[in-house]
Amino acid sequence: MKPITLALDDTSIDQLKRHIALRLPEMRPAHRMEFAARGLGYRTYASLLSALREGPIFIDHMDPENAIAFAERVEYDMDPDDIRAVLFGLSALSVADSTSSRHFGRR
């Protein structure tokens, strides 16, 4: 898959929730956000929210393997390629100039 860039701020978290809910409607809401956070390279959804409280973040590295491991841990049966597609679909939410946001790869 092609590299992506994703900018998130405290106002785009609702877009993130809607995107994941539309693609994973059968997954529990709390699990969806933990799944998304792990796929974005965070250990937990709380750590993602903490980073957002400090200001916008700029992500250029997805971590689908971490999201896959979380999905397996909560016994959510989904093809790994579908999980990757959900995560890389996040790039449609927001793309920003890296000079205007804090930059993150892995956290």
Image: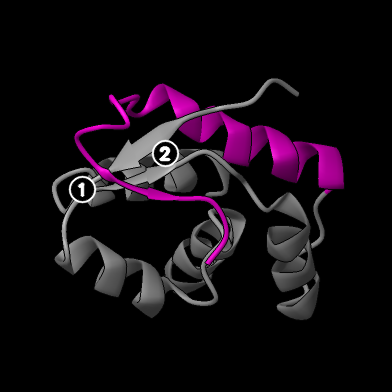
Which element is circle 2 on? helix
List x then y, in percent, for residue 4: 55, 27
Q: In the rendered structure, are the residues bearing label 1 and label 2 in contact, judged by CB atoms less than 8 Å apart?
A: no
Residue drawn where x is 57% and y is 63% of the image = 35
Judge the density around disc 1: few (<14), some (14-19), many (≥20) Cα neighbours within 10 Å. some
Q: Is residue 22 above or below residue 31?
A: above
Which one is nearer the viewer's eye here, 89 or 41?
41
Q: Amino acid at mark 1?
A: Asp
Q: Foreground residue, 99 or 86? A: 99
Q: Which residue has dot 1 on it?
A: 9
Residue 26, given in percent of the width and then of the height, sits at 59, 56
Q: Position of residue 50 (x, y in %)?
A: 27, 74
Q: Residues within 10 Å of mark 2 (few under 14, many from 20)?
A: some
Identify the magenta region.
Answer: 79-107
Q: Relative to the observer, which residue lies in front, 66 or 83?
A: 66
Q: Secondary structure at mark 1?
A: loop
The colour scheme applied to this rendered structure is one colour
Name the quarter where the N terminus is drawn: top right
Q: Is residue 38 left or right of residue 8?
A: right
Q: Which mark is residue 19?
A: 2
Q: Position of residue 96 (x, y in %)?
A: 29, 26
Residue at (64, 25) in percent of width and height: 3
> Would residue 15 appear left or right of 5 to someone viewing this image?
left
* Residue 25 on the magenta span: no
User: What amino acid is found at the position of numbered circle 2 in the picture?
Assistant: His
**Residue 82 magenta:** yes
- State the residue at coordinates (28%, 40%): 15
Mark pair 1, 2: CA separation: 15 Å
